[in-house]
Image: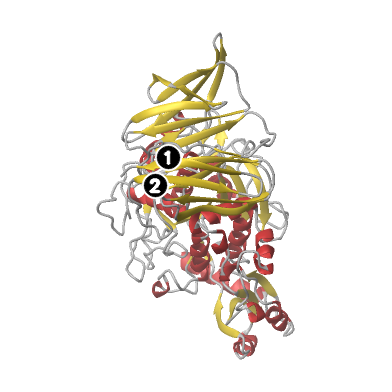
Amino acid sequence: MKKIFILIFFWSFLFAYEGEEKYWIVFKDKGIYENVSLAKGSVVYERLKGSISRRAFERRLKVVKDESKVFDYYDIPVYEEYVNRIKSLGIKINVISKWLNAVSAFLDSEKINIVKSLPFVASVSPVAKSVRTYVDVYDYGPSERQIRLSGVKKLHEMNIVGKDVIVGVMDTGFRLSHESLVNVDVLAEYDFIFNDSTTANSPQDSPNQDFHGTLVLSVLGGKKEGKIYGVAPGAKFVLAKTEDVRSETPVEEDNWVRAIEWMDSLGVDVVSSSLGYIDWYTYKDMDGNTAKITKAADIAFQKGIVVVNSAGNERNTPWKYIVAPADGKYVIAVGAVDSTGRVASFSSMGPTYDGRIKPDVCALGVSVFGASTGSTSSYVYASGTSLSCPIVAGIAALILSTHPELNSFDVRDAIRNTASRANNPDNDYGWGVVDALSSALYHGPILSNFPEIKENVNGYEISVYAMSKSGIKEIFIMANNQKVPMYPVSENKFAGVLSSLPPQFSIFVIDNQNKTNILTTYLESKPPDKFYLSQNFPNPFNSKTIFLLDVSEPVQVEISIYNILGQKVRTLENRFFSQPIRGYRIVWDGKDEEGRNLPSGVYFCRLESEKFKTVRKVVLMR
């Protein structure tokens, strides 16, 4: 039946465009910009910096560690003259992708030959169409199995809910009037099908257009007391409507590519995509380097976005294997298991064509409870890797909310290396069923996303949840340059009392391996009135230490580590702060500029700017 459906789909599309199909036109170079300077301070660098949000810049910086490396060849725009030359042939262009150095356009066989003959064109290939990755829908009551099976509930109980993390969701559309979604924090939304800023159903849409996206978003971030809580209900969301479910309009990967470039510019931290693409591709193409959508997904990951994608529902079809972009070298491909932890009968298997293990991990994908578009208060059970994907994307958001210093590679390591089969991964389960709590603890102790504050006769009781694999050695509040100890009051919960409530305070936790985490709370929104670099915590340290920086006005700041001989061994930050900021977190891992472990000893952290200079003494103990 599925094959017949695809054939009807394809025929309708050919008829609609009178013999034209959509193709990628990939260019050989970027024209006059091919060898342009991307050096920090150059005209192009500054123009690119202005094209993305500050948050996006900082997310990229967590990966490359150096401002001069934030932008690369992928960020250079497609050469406009090439685009104009294509248009001059009477060709309609749909999407322009700087990452792929390509455009998608409608071509017939005659135009294909003309375009291929152009001296600046490298290749012409079909735009792939997607297969949706959910299976059956059931009609019975609510459940919290998706929260329990993956260990999410324990993090929720510790007030780790995805706060301050931005998750991008690509799907069919979103009915935000549903009771489980009305309180979801949506920062931006865009319809890449009809090119407007509303992802709800349009008059042109099929009535069930927004069903799939509504279901997926509710599993990820929905919240309705007594009915459903998503994995990351405290996160913020950017929504992209990229899939058209109408039978006469096939879904194409170019909308996906356009959407993820948009999400990158907005500073999205995690992307959840429950779509897969196999039309026009063969299993041989599932090598992480052929499918255009896979290339875009891997570029996004290397720019600091944790890209999570459904593995696919093809196990029982002739295809069997994972679908693009789940074949990406960096993409976290998610398979499905049932409530007993057994791989679902439909969950696509690995390996990739080049022999890499896929999927990466699994989560519950059988009878997952979520919102339905039948009414604003209706719910369904559904199955598919479409539902296991948002569970893992939500877990990535939880990890980042308690460890905001991590980059995309760190998050992937935490998720894979703590899953149920991490010691013996295979091509059915990957590294195994995800464990949210263990993955959050992988890089060190965890703290609540926010403290609880209660006024009492002694002042203000500040309480927080904290946990570490090795146990808590010390936990305290820093307020008004005073250190206030915190004491256990219940399992994993600690409290301390402040005589008065300052505009900001920080809670530090140090575990028995001297790993640290910090939670800074701001009770006033006004910017700091002076520059300040905190003493690092812990000090002495072994594997990681953290400084907090307050910047009171726009300024260029360099923060570097020097050894006892006065030699610079590492630059931690060298950047321009365009606006005031409180509590900017700076992490040093005890390594030099080349990534080599430095020996034990005394080091100095030096901050230099036009407005302020200071030095902090740091002790590294191996």
Query: x, y (%) of residue 6?
Result: 52, 68
Precedes in sequence: disc 2 or disc 1: 1
Residue position for label 2: 363
Residue 245 is at least partly visible in this image: no
Q: Viewer-proximal residue, 427 or 597?
A: 597
Question: Which one is nearer the viewer's eye here, 147 or 497?
Answer: 497
- Residue 517, horizontal then vertical, whole percent: 44, 37
Would you say the residues marked 2 and 1 are in contact, meaning their CB atoms lie under 8 Å apart? yes
Q: Is residue 15 left or right of residue 311?
A: right
Q: Quadrant of residue 379?
A: top right
The dot on residue 266 is none
Between the C-alphas of marks 2 and 1, the distance is 8 Å
Quadrant into which the C terminus falls: top left
Q: Residue at x 54, y 27 (%)?
A: 481
Q: Quadrant of residue 466?
A: top left
For the residue marked with disc 1, what is the amino acid?
Gln
Instruction: State whether residue 36 appears in this view.
Output: yes
- Secondary structure of the residue carrying tag 2 is strand
Task: Kindly identify which residue carries mark 1.
Answer: 146
Residue 571 at what x, y percent from top left? Answer: 49, 54
Kind of residue sitting beneath label 2: Ala
Residue 280 % position (x, y): 49, 74
- Picture layout, residue 451 above or below residue 114: above
Question: Is residue 80 depicted above or below 426 in this figure?
Answer: below
From the viewer's side, name the closer residue of 572 and 259.
Answer: 572
Callout 2 environment at 10 Å: few (<14), some (14 to 19), or many (20+)?
many
Q: Total marks drawn?
A: 2
Q: Residue furthest front?
A: 565
Closer to us: 210 or 517: 517
User: Under tag 1, what secondary structure?
Assistant: helix
